[in-house]
Amino acid sequence: MDAEWIREIDPGEILVIDRNGLASQWLSEKAERKACIFEFIYFSRPDSRIFGEKVDKARRKLGKTLSLENPVAADRIISVPDSSNTAALGYAQESGIKFEIGLIRNHYIGRTFIHPVPSMRDFSVRIKFNPVQGVLKNKRVIIVDDSIVRGTTLKLLARMVRQAGASEIHVRISSPPIRFPCYYGMDFPTKEELIANTMTVDETKKFLEVDSLTYLSLEGLLASVPQERGGYCTACFSGDYPIIPDQKIVKLQLENGIVS
Ligand code: SF4
């Protein structure tokens, strides 16, 4: 676009752009700033810059910290493309284990976890990803993924990797378990549908039918992202909500099955 990056818009700020230039208006005197830490984990593209940091750099650091916290002997590291590519590269860099493209993503299929009907989600996963047998056969494979929401997509992918001949599958998640709903606009499913809310890590490992499963710790996550002037929101991991959600909005979300 040839656009010039100037600064981020602050919480509560309305930026008016007209022929006279830029002017700020404020919804309130002072709004506390809490940055969504999930931007570094999943939402933002690696070529973005957010909260004063390059997303690629922060996401690699997540992978490196994950490797330091959760090492495992393996022959290959693969990512769940495209959102986990950068964290997987960080894990590979730190561990010295070779990164390979083990799953090919069909770019004509949309995101799967927002499909409301399970059968549609399963079908779209099957047509969205294809395993690369030559990379996986008789290999101990680490699958790096950015997060687990319901776990259904990852279960199907792990099965695909196993069917392609992997001798062991170790899943490493570059964020902590998601246990709480997001009241600030993120389209997570209800609390009951969040796998980390209903199963222990060991039960999730069994559900995924993999040899091991570990997550990045909350401490490791916070140590991997840059200092933020107002701090971060980590509510979906910690339950520590920076703003108590407006009860009217929660009621509406409950009535519409957005949160539970
Ligand atoms: S709960 Fe907070 S950290 Fe989690 S997605 Fe929502 S805004 Fe982001």
Image (cartoon, rainbow, N blue to C red):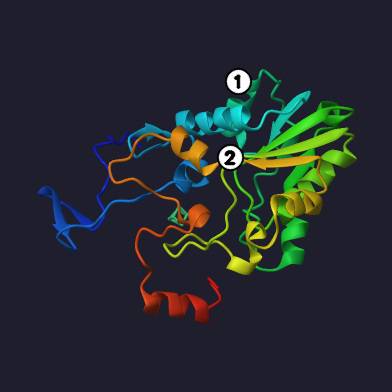
Q: Residue at x 53, y 71 (%)?
A: 259
Of 85 and 3, which appears nearest the observer?
A: 85
Of 170 and 159, which appears nearest the observer?
A: 170
Please tell me which of labels 2 and 1 falls first in the chain. 1
Q: Amino acid at mark 1?
A: Gln
Is residue 144 visible in the rendered image? The answer is yes
Mark 2 crowd level (few <14, some 14–19, many ≥20, 10 Å Cα): many
In the rendering, at what x and y percent does residue 141 appear?
Answer: 78, 31
- Find disc 2 in the rendering and name its residue: 216
Q: Secondary structure at mark 2?
A: loop
Note whether 172 is above or below 246 in the view shown. Answer: above
Q: Amino acid at mark 2?
A: Leu
In the rendering, at what x and y percent does residue 156 appear?
Answer: 79, 50
Is residue 47 visible in the rendered image? The answer is no
User: In the picture, which quadrant includes the N terminus?
Assistant: top left
Q: Quarter containing ligand 1?
A: bottom left
Ligand 1 within 8 Å of the CB at mark 2: no
Note whether 172 is above or below 33 in the view shown. Answer: above
Q: Is residue 215 left or right of residue 155?
A: left
When asked about the image quadrant of residue 26, the answer is bottom left
- Find disc 1 in the rendering and name its residue: 93
Q: Residue at x 89, y 28 (%)?
A: 138
Q: Residue at x 73, y 63 (%)?
A: 120
Of 73 and 106, which appears nearest the observer?
A: 73
In the rendering, at what x and y percent does residue 101 appear?
Answer: 72, 29
Q: CA distance from mark 2 to mark 1?
A: 16 Å
Mark 1 crowd level (few <14, some 14–19, many ≥20, 10 Å Cα): some
Q: Secondary structure at mark 1?
A: helix
Of 137 and 230, which appears nearest the observer?
A: 230
Q: Is residue 22 left or right of residue 127?
A: left
User: In the picture, which quadrant includes the C terminus?
Assistant: bottom right
